[in-house]
Amino acid sequence: MRAGLHVLATLALLPYVLLATAFVLLEQAIGDGTLSALLATLLAQVLWLVPWGLLGFLAGTALLAALGLHPASRWVGGLVLCVLALATIAVVMVKPTAPVEVEDLIFLLPCLLVAVYGAWTVIAEGPQRARRTPVHDRRSA
């Protein structure tokens, strides 16, 4: 059940990570000033992203999903989910110049739920779990 939830949370986080990445890349491209510099920066980013960025993104997504499948590494996957979701929320909320409205918060709610799920996974299955479990419960497990 938890492995399925982890994979579902990973898939729910993907569009938000892509949106935050687009914000960062576009800000870098627009910050150059002129139209020719914008096009040159976008071309350089595309030429790098197509062969390497796509492969790295797919490999990272597969690795993050795989971390949640094994109980011993699930807390690490939850930690990565939580940090990535919080960073994505921060980028999406800070980058636009317009003030944050209720619609924006509703849009970010699934990403926030992924962050909460990741934090819950770290607390429930983290490395300190063995210390919190009483001795008689460890023998029966």
Image: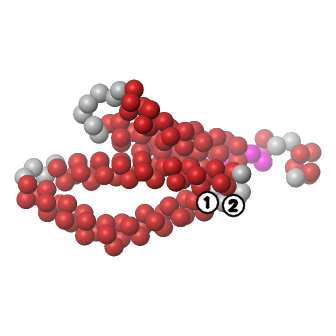
Q: Residues within 10 Å of mark 1 (few under 14, many from 20)?
A: many
- Residue 110 vertical placement versus 79 (above, below): above
Q: Secondary structure at mark 1?
A: helix
- Residue at image position (36%, 49%) is 19
Which x, y percent locates residue 7? 59, 55
Q: Secondary structure at mark 2?
A: loop
Q: Is residue 127 magenta?
A: yes
Q: Is residue 104 magenta?
A: no
Which x, y percent locates residue 133? 82, 43
Amino acid type, residue under disc 2 in the picture: His
Magenta-tinted stretch:
126-131
Inter-mark Cα distance, 2 to 1: 6 Å
Q: Is residue 19 visible?
A: yes
Which x, y percent locates residue 126? 68, 48
- Residue at image position (87%, 49%) is 138
Residue 108 left/right relative to 65 = left
Reading the image, the residue beneath label 1 is 67
| Residue 70, label in figure | 2
| Residue 118, label in figure | none
Amino acid type, residue under disc 1 in the picture: Leu
Q: Is residue 80 visible?
A: no
- Looking at the image, which is closer to me, 8 or 112? 8
Asked whether the beta carbons under mark 2 and mark 1 sit within 8 Å of each other, the answer is yes
- Residue 58 vertical placement versus 31 (above, below): below
Which x, y percent locates residue 60? 48, 63
Residue 71 left/right relative to 108 = right
